[in-house]
Amino acid sequence: MRAFTYDRADSVEGAVRGIAGRPGSRFVAGGTNLLDLMKADAMRPAHLIDISRLPLDRIEETADGGLRLGALARNADTAYDERVSRRYPMLSKAILAGASPQLRNMATNGGNLLQRTRCYYFYDSATPCNKREPGSGCGALVGVNRIHAILGASEHCIAVHPSDMCVALAALEATVRVVGPGPGPGGGPGSERTIPFAAFHRLPGDAPHIDTELRPDELITAIDLPPKGFAEHSTYLKVRDRASYAFALVSVAAALEIADGTVAEARLALGGVAHKPWRDEEAEQALAGKPPTGESFRAAARILLRRAQGYGHNDFKIDLAERAIVRALAEAAGTEAA
């Protein structure tokens, strides 16, 4: 690991003021991904600002009937929070499908959003990777790409986003609250803005080294869940190589509102298939007004995957994703898998 300097923030204002004055610095809280990346020489921050003691670890009700998840609340605490598991069971299930109990006890909600890809070439500093070293090339395009993207990739990067939690947050249409160094309400640092979850993560395009719309001098403070949690008809399905502690080959967050025997509203998000949690509104709209049957689920899956492309080793993911979507929708609807 390369040498770096370190200090600890004692306020949100101090944190954003500190990072604004030191370009190339990074925030650290649970450290479950960043420290691994520093050890692998995939990330090289010269300075770390420890935010783990900031008062951003609460889970509380919002005025509109939703729930606000503090950025520093631990993943385990979030998954087992009674309000989360009762009102947003899909999110609770997704968090518990990720990592190990030890990691979930350390990992924070804000850090989960900022996880970086587990692409082999990103972690191996001896191979080209446009995400790690812009302009160096993409080793995965012609290499071993079994875990890589089938949707939304570019000639510069075919890596996938690794988070389970983010797939459920995308389906729920959560909102990310951030604070930056601009003037806040009191005149000091602390300008606030919100980012819809669908716009938070980026596709790789020609700048795969930029994962999100979060600016380098901004801090995530919370994630807002809307009132609607699809508690009656939702699920999170994760398909992986082993039963625990493995990243998704394909995962599906499926949520349905069913009235009078037909689908009134559908939400569908996929993980393990793209550079960000993948949603397709056309596929969701195809389910509206239809009975919750295998036939309508397969039709929606085929719309969602109509532009899917494999790169050799991961061609199997296209068929796997279709089967996973159908199974997840059947589980959400409470019907037999088609």
Image (cartoon, rainbow, N blue to C red):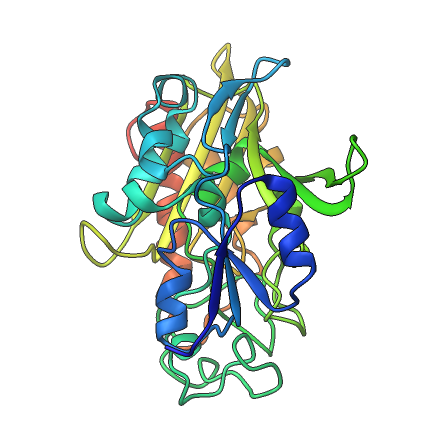
In the rendered image of this protein, does residue 19 appear above or below residue 336?
below
Q: Nearer the viewer, residue 273 or 102?
A: 102
Q: Residue at x 45, y 75 (%)?
A: 311
Q: Quadrant of the C terminus?
A: top left
Decide if residue 99 is on the left or right side of residue 190. Answer: left
Instruction: Give residue 39's position: percent from left, percent from top.
Output: 35, 73
Decide if residue 183 is on the left or right side of residue 135. Answer: right
The residue furthest left is: 243
Q: Residue at x 28, y 28 (%)?
A: 336
Looking at the rendering, which quadrant does residue 288 occupy? Answer: top right
Instruction: Give residue 166's position: percent from left, percent from top.
Output: 48, 44
Q: Residue at x 41, y 32 (%)?
A: 91
Q: Quadrant of the N terminus?
A: bottom left
Q: Nearer the viewer, residue 330 or 70?
A: 70
Instruction: Give residue 182's position: percent from left, percent from top.
Output: 78, 46
Instruction: Give residue 214's position: percent from left, percent from top.
Output: 65, 53
Query: Quick check: can you spot residue 315?
Result: no
